[in-house]
Amino acid sequence: MAERLVFTTEEREETFRLYAKVKEMLGSSLQEGDEERIRRHLTEYMEHTESGRDVFGLNPVVESLRMAQTVVEEIGLRRDAVLAIMLRPSVEEGFTTIEQIRTDYGEAVARILHGLQRIQQLYKKNPVIESENFRNLLLSFAEDMRVILIMIADRVNLMRQIRDASNDEARRRVSEEAAYLYAPLAHKLGLYKLKSELEDLSLKYLEHDAYYHIKEKLNATKKSRDAYIANFITPIQERLEAAGLKFHMKGRTKSIHSIWQKMKKQKCPFEGVYDLFAIRIIIDCPEEKEKMQCWQAYSIVTDMYQPNPKRLRDWLSVPKSNGYESLHITVLGPEQKWVEVQIRTERMDEVAERGVAAHWRYKGVKAESGMDDWLNSIRQMLENSDGVEAMDQFKMDLYEDEVFVFTPRGDLLKFPKGATVLDFAYHIHSKIGNQCVGARINNKVVNIRHQLQSGDQVEVMTQTNQKPKQEWLSIVKTSRAKSKIRLALKETQQADGLFAKEALERKFRNRKIEMEEPVMMRVIKRMGFKETSEFYRQIANGQLDTNVVADKYLEEKQRETLPTGDNQARSAAEFQFDSTLNAPPSSLNQNDVLVIDQNLKGIDFQLAKCCHPIYGDAVFGFLTAGGGIKIHRDDCPNAAELRKRFGYRIVKARWSGKGSSMYSITLRVIGTDDIGIVNNLTSIISKDERLVLRSINIDSHDGLFSGNLVVMLDDTSRLEMLIRKLRTVKGVKQVVRI
């Protein structure tokens, strides 16, 4: 059990002093009985709590009251948020429950405390707080917007108290969170004062020397800076008033953090930051006269001070895409110092501060879809006294189309609503997705169809024998997962197709049947298959028996030999001699060319086995005695003899279309024997999904090796590329096609 928290005399006095001040600030927003219940609760908790101090040695009760004061003074929150803050320590320590608080103080207070608890659970998952995703998850997880405002106030209050803390590591961590997470959130919500304070305090703790260097410089120059501003704006005021313009002017000095950022960006010393302050001229005029009076003010300023034309920003004539309107000009003021002047109207200033072009967008921070209007409405509700009460019914739904989940390492990933465990697995890696069988979410095992919820911590479970299935496409939500599943299915289909083809060829060899591709294509068509891939898929999964296919093939071969048409027997008297059959080659039309479809459909073509032509080879056709045509390569070993003896049977031929057929070729490889040479050769082939190694036969003798590789590929360009790659293997001396 933790050591009991003992209040010092100073802490007791501070507790009651802060409580009295907060109660006074809340005034009429407290309901009947609230004051008595909360005082009794705090008194009992102080006497009986077993909680300890935090890592900085701070008293949680005192800090909760300081935070309550901050949210009332700086943000304007009232009863529900303040009660939730004061009750938070006792809920976290188990002194009371949310259900009891719901009974005593109402649903709104309980809801805020529940949101604070959920965010506390997020931190236990060790998230990467620098990521934009975590910032968005924090927003979507809070349910009630006041939870985020309380978290910002909590961090501001903590940063104010840890100046003298001895735990440097803890101070560094909370300072980094303030800079990366809470300052940007405060910026987005228009809490500019708190945002600047968080940034400055973060800089103070993280880069102590830089902070105090700039602070000392600002203090040393404050008097002269104020005098300079007065000297600069006085003549402008006189000229604007003389022109009859209604306006007011205000100046602002950059925060220490902003000055430091500019010094780093421009790589210059403090003295090199010329725009330590800016002057804003805000004109009060009807909307129809806005542009005219803004340009009139611009003319007056630039008549008095030399402008820098490179620094002119005219968002008056052409407003920014986000609606921001203003004139920015940098002029050379007295003492040769550059001063930025912003000119706009009351309406433009209102839009810039509250509307579409909030200050954080104006600075260039890109918003996500839906963020602008939503955050602007929150800012307006905070600045409107009636709006604070309206926040009781306000629920955050900005990220209703997105979920944010954690990896086991704490990384945060974003998915569309409805995304499943399978989407998460494929986001991590294709192999993890292909082998995914489920996941462990928050230590509970779920299947691949389980939909992800914001805040889930997901650990994917895999099995090596798992393979992607067609129905997975209907499970996943993201296009990334769908494309990876389609690719995996295609690869599986190709592998199954090659396996089925080899099984069919093995069956044909066992039955002493010579497979001819054209005949097989007709068999596939007669069996009702439109795609050869479907035919081989059914063989691979056992739906189609190879014996049935072999029988169909034999039937097709028999059909070819049946006497039909002109092949029927007839009388010799009816026979007419065709003199062209024995005509010399010169009598044939040399322009006739046999166009060969790569799949060899329609006509009884066969690829000659003496030279194994493939798509892309220069080829010719040879009319066989049986009436069929054999396709030979031009450089076939038998080509010269065929042309010499049977020139009248030679037919010009060329390939047409590329199709999807695969051809078998044999490569002869010779080189120096070396360990791993076979692995090096086969790895080149295996890396190309459009190459299939059918067989390899390597012999080694006297320090040399020689062997044959039988490869399936689709054309000569693929063959030439393969030969070039094989020749680069260390030890290979020669690669030739045989």
Image: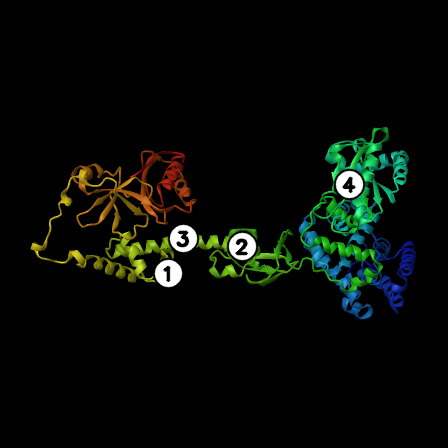
Q: Name the quadrant of the N terminus.
A: bottom right
Is residue 611 rendered to the left or right of residue 540? left
Where does label 4 land, which residue? 327
Disc 1 or 3, which lies upstream in sequence?
A: 3
Which element carries disc 3, helix, strand or loop? Answer: helix
Disc 2 or 4, which lies upstream in sequence?
A: 4
User: What whole-number distance in Å separates the C-alpha atoms at marks 3 and 4?
Assistant: 64 Å
Which element carries disc 2, helix, strand or loop? Answer: helix
**Residue 481: which disc?**
2
User: What whole-number distance in Å separates the C-alpha atoms at marks 3 and 2?
Assistant: 20 Å
Image quadrant where residue 561 sits: bottom left
Which element carries disc 4, helix, strand or loop? Answer: strand
Where does label 1 land, which residue? 538
Front one among 148 and 584: 584
Q: Amino acid at mark 1?
A: Gln
Where does label 3 land, which residue? 494
Q: Nearer the viewer, mark 3 or mark 4?
A: 4
User: What whole-number distance in Å separates the C-alpha atoms at marks 1 and 3?
Assistant: 13 Å
- Furthest-top residue in this view: 336
Q: Amino acid at mark 3?
A: Gln
Q: Amino acid at mark 4?
A: Leu
Placement of 458 over or under 720, stated as above or below: below
